[in-house]
Every structure is written in C-alpha cells, then in structure tokens.
C-alpha cells in the first residue's frame, strides 16, 4: 500500500486505541529505531488535519524518544471510527512477529550480534546445554531483561532454551524447530529437547566417522598360531578385547588335520558341549576384563533335532560370562540338507557375550533409514492427549537378524585360488560385530580362524589380529593372506601420502 511521510507533530494516537492500550516506554524499540530505522509503516486515519495512529504506537513514541526522526512512513486508511478497532486487530494479526524475528531482536539484547561462535557459545552457555540453571556469561539477569523487553511472557530459563534452539538452527535448520515453535506445533521445551536429541545423534555419527577414518590409518600387526585353542595360555600377554569363535558344528563336517580331539566328531552331544566349554574357558582366561566375544553356532539335525543351541546357551552361562544378546543368522541362498518332516533349515545362531561386569564399547553398525534424512517424527500421544515427538536420525542401528548369502569363495580365493576350506564364514558376518564392538588399536582374536576371514576384517577395522587354528594348511594360508592384506594397506597408504 502507498505510504505517506507524516511529520511527528501531525501524529497522535487515536483515542479509541488509547482506551484499550497503555503504552509503556520501550527501550528496546527505541534502541532499534535509533540503530535500525523501521521501514514498517504506521497505520493512521486522517481527521481534521491530524493523523491518528491506529497501529504502530510504539514506533511513534520510540521515534520521539530516539530524537532523530522528523516524520514516519504512514499508511492512511479511509475508514470510519466504528471500523478502527477491528481494523487494528487485522493489522496486528498481519504483522504478527515471527518467532525467528523475535529471536533476532533478543540477540541484540543479549549482545550476541557480531560475536564469534565461541563467544556466542559462552554467552548462551551452550557447552552446558543440559544444565537447566546455566545462563552462560550473559547471566540470568540479562535473560530476564530480554524476556521483559521483548514482551515474551516466560521465564529466563525458557528464553535460554529458545535461544539455544535458535542458535542451533543457524548451522542446522533441517528440523524446522523455530518454525514449529512459531506455528504452535512445539512448545519451546519440546523443541529444546528435540534439539538436544538431534545433537546427541549427530555426535554419535561424528564419532563413528572418526573411528572409520582412524581405522584406515592405523598401523596394525597380525600373528597366526598353529595350535589347539583348548589351551591359549601362551597368548595371555595379548589380552584381546574382542574374540571370535566359529567352531566346528557337531557331526556336520569332517575337516582336515583336526588333532586328537577331533572336535565336532564326538560320540555324544555331551562330549561335544564339554569340549566347546574348554574353548570358551581358554578364551575367557586370556581376554581383557572388558572383552566381548562372539560365538557362531549351528544346530545339527543328524538323526533329528537335538536342541544344541539351547544346551549351548546354558553351557555358556555356566562359564560365568554374560550373554548380551543372540542374533539369528539367515543364509539367504543356502542349500541345506533336508530334514525329515521339517522345512529347509537356513538359520544359524550367533551369541554375543561379554566378560562378567564388562564395560562394553558399542558403536553399532548403522543402516540408512528409508527416509534417508534426519527428521522429527510423531510418537504415541501422551496420556493427556498432547502430541509427542522424537528425532529420527538418517541412520538406524541394524537389526539383530543377520541375512547374508553363503560365503563367496572369491573373498579368500583371491589370495590363493588353490586353497580350500570346508566352512568359511562370510566377511559381512564378522564385519557387523567387529565394527560394532571394537575401536581401532584394539587386539582381536579368532580362535578357529580357518581361512582368516575374521583376521582380514579385524585388520581392515584398524585392529591387531591374532588367529589360532589347529590345521597347518589354514595357518599357512592365513599368514600369506594377512601379509598380502597388510602389504596392500601399506601400498595404498603410501599412495595416499604421495
Ligand atoms: C567352522 S571352521 C571356522 C572357519 C572360519 N570362521 C572362517 O571363516 O574361515 C572351524 C575351524 O576350527 C578349526 N579347529 C578345529 N579344531 C580346532 C582346535 N582344537 N583348535 C583350533 N582350531 C580348531 C578347524 O581347523 C577349522 O578351520
């Protein structure tokens, strides 16, 4: 609409407006009029040569107080007195100040404008976001003044939360939290909690990325031992933090060079479980006190179902370790032996165990969500019917159900096409656990290392690798393989450095 410049001396507040609104001096508006002259026009009606303000009274008084205004831009409306109050409401609605604009104004009051990020963080106390009583170097007082001056009817604590969200959205506004506060979707407290959760998720993601980069650059070593894993006492000094057992299953396959024990060929299930226990106890004896180890075990259906997994689980508990959880492992393309009166059996079981009382390092393998971006989602309504929200990251923890094809021979054949092994496990299975439970620089052990699938995964995750197997052919192959893997790493590192 067209604006007219009207001298301050020709302006008055309309008496009808004065009846409903008391104008208090507003130092903030005066300050901003002085330093950032308002472009928004004042709404007036003309009566007998005098312009009567129906909306914009604060700007009028502040212009007088600021002392550097002769006139104000005005929109002159041709309306009757009976229309004045209704029109004022319409203008008020139209000029409702967006929450982000309010925040911008508050930044002035708190002295945030023009300060660098470090100073801003200090002023807002951003480093102590979880502390409700923290008001940064700005101090509680300044927050209280800011609340009062900007006409926001809430506590300084709430204002600090609001400013925390506002500041956060300067670097990441993908969640639209200030917008949501403005349109009433979120209370300030809700938006603030969502922000905290978002920061936490971002931090976790950053940690994970840092680990991956560190893994690539870590210097690692490997050692392979040709011996029975029933006694690992010679390896005590290594104190591995992560261990893997993928033992021979009972009566399933006959491997070469299996020594006297002939593990897996025992006459009775009890003997097999007793032998299995010896391996687990030998491992427990050398593990770090916060160690985690993973056991891959399959059911045997020879002569009918034997509840091996159930009994195995009981046996694990008897050794004194704690079971963190159990993963079904489904082989998507397996060709199993058919069991009488039963379906195709394509699953195996993986137990994740920890030393008693261990403090576990868990940075789980993640997968991209179907939405593929971080977002606010609605959860179930609260008891009082109000909406509740949560942050869904762009990634989520993979499930405990592992689905892989059976091993692709090329994973190990590329190191020697003539080498054969009866039961290698896919590297993807190792990767899920190694990535989730280790950090670069840790030492990992596979006490039935076979083809060395696990050893390669350990090294590729920046961990030192120890392999043990009773079969000399497998041990020789693992040595060859790991020399090639680490040689390859060194070569690519050299290329990166050049
Ligand atoms: C199921 S395979 C493990 C395969 C391995 N996970 C891989 O991906 O190649 C079992 C391995 O245990 C080894 N083994 C059997 N008895 C053993 C014993 N007493 N001590 C150490 N290793 C043994 C076998 O030689 C075989 O390589």
Image (cartoon, grey):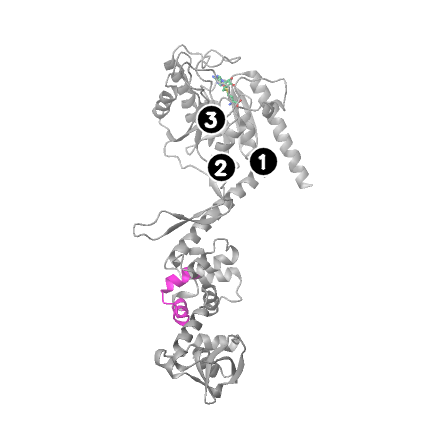
Q: Is residue 438 left or right of residue 89?
A: right
Q: Residue furthest right?
A: 498
Q: Which mark is residue 448?
A: none
- Numbered disc in front, either 3 or 2: 3
Q: Secondary structure at mark 2?
A: loop
- Is residue 368 something one can see in this rendering? yes
Q: Is residue 154 magenta?
A: yes
Q: Residue furthest bottom?
A: 48
Q: Residue 138 appears at what percent x and percent y?
A: 43, 65
- Does the CB distance between marks 2 and 1 fall below 8 Å? no
Residue at 38 percent of width and 65 percent of height: 140
- Is residue 287 something one can see in this rendering? no
First in sequence, mark 3 or 2: give its number: 3
Position of the C terminus, as image quadrant, is top right
Q: Residue 415 appears at what percent x and percent y?
A: 63, 24
Q: List the residue tagged with mark 3.
A: 330
- Spatial CA distance of label 2 from label 1 is 22 Å
Q: Residues within 10 Å of mark 1 (few under 14, many from 20)?
A: some
- Does the CB distance between marks 3 and 1 fall below 8 Å? no
Q: Residue furthest left?
A: 384
Q: Secondary structure at mark 1?
A: loop
Q: Is residue 229 above or below residue 462?
A: above
First in sequence, mark 3 or 1: give its number: 1
Q: Is residue 419 left or right of residue 74?
A: right
Q: List the residue tagged with mark 2.
A: 365
Q: Please state the extent of the stretch shown in magenta in the rendering.
A: 142-162
Q: Residue 256 appears at what percent x and percent y?
A: 53, 13
Q: Residue 31 appears at what percent x and percent y?
A: 48, 76
- Numbered disc in front, either 2 or 1: 2
Q: List the residue tagged with mark 1.
A: 219
């Amino acid at each position: 609409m067209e604006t007219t410049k009207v001298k301050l001396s020709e302006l008055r507040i309309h008496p009808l407006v004065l009846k409903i609104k008391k104008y208090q001096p507003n130092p903030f508006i005066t300050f901003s009029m002085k330093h950032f002259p308002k472009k928004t026009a004042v709404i007036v009606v003309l009566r007998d040569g005098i312009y009567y303000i129906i909306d914009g009274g604060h700007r009028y008084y502040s212009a007088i107080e600021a002392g550097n205004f002769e006139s104000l831009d005005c929109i002159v409306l041709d309306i009757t007195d009976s229309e004045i109050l209704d029109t004022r409401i319409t203008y008020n609605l139209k000029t409702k100040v967006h929450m982000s604009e309010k925040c911008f104004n508050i930044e002035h009051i708190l002295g945030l404008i023009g300060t660098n990020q470090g100073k801003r963080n200090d002023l807002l106390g951003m480093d102590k976001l979880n502390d409700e009583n923290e008001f940064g170097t700005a101090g509680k007082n300044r927050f209280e003044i800011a609340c009062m001056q900007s006409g926001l009817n809430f506590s300084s604590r709430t204002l600090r939360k609001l400013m925390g969200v506002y500041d956060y959205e300067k670097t990441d506004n993908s969640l639209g939290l200030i917008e949501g506060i403005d349109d009433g979707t979120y209370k300030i407290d809700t938006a603030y909690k969502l922000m905290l959760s978002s920061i936490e998720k971002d931090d976790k993601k950053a940690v994970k990325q840092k680990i991956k980069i560190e893994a690539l650059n870590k210097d690692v070593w490997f050692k392979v031992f040709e011996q029975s894993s029933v006694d690992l006492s010679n390896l005590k000094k290594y104190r591995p933090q992560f261990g893997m057992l993928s033992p021979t299953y009972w009566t399933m396959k006959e491997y070469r060079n299996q020594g006297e024990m002939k593990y897996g060929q025992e006459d009775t299930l009890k003997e097999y479980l007793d032998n299995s226990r010896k391996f687990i106890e030998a491992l427990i004896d050398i593990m770090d006190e916060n160690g985690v180890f993973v056991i891959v075990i399959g059911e045997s259906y020879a002569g009918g179902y034997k509840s091996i997994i159930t009994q195995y689980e009981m046996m694990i508990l008897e050794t004194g370790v704690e079971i963190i959880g159990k993963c079904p492992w489904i082989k998507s393309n397996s060709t199993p032996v058919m069991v009488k009166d039963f379906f195709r059996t394509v699953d195996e079981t993986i137990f994740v165990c920890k030393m008693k009382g261990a403090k576990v390092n868990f940075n789980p393998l993640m997968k991209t969500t179907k939405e593929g971006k971080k977002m606010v989602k609605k959860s179930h309504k609260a008891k009082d019917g109000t909406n509740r929200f949560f942050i869904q990251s762009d990634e989520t923890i993979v499930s405990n159900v592992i689905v892989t094809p059976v091993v692709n021979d090329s994973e190990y054949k590329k190191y020697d096409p003539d080498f054969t092994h009866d039961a290698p496990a896919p590297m993807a299975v190792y990767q899920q656990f190694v990535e989730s439970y280790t950090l670069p620089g840790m030492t990992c052990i596979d006490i039935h290392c076979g083809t060395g699938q696990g050893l390669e995964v350990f090294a590729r995750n920046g961990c030192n690798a120890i392999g043990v197997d009773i079969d000399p052919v497998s041990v020789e192959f693992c040595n060859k393989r790991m020399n090639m893997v680490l040689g390859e790493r060194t070569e690519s590192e050299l290329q990166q450095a050049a």
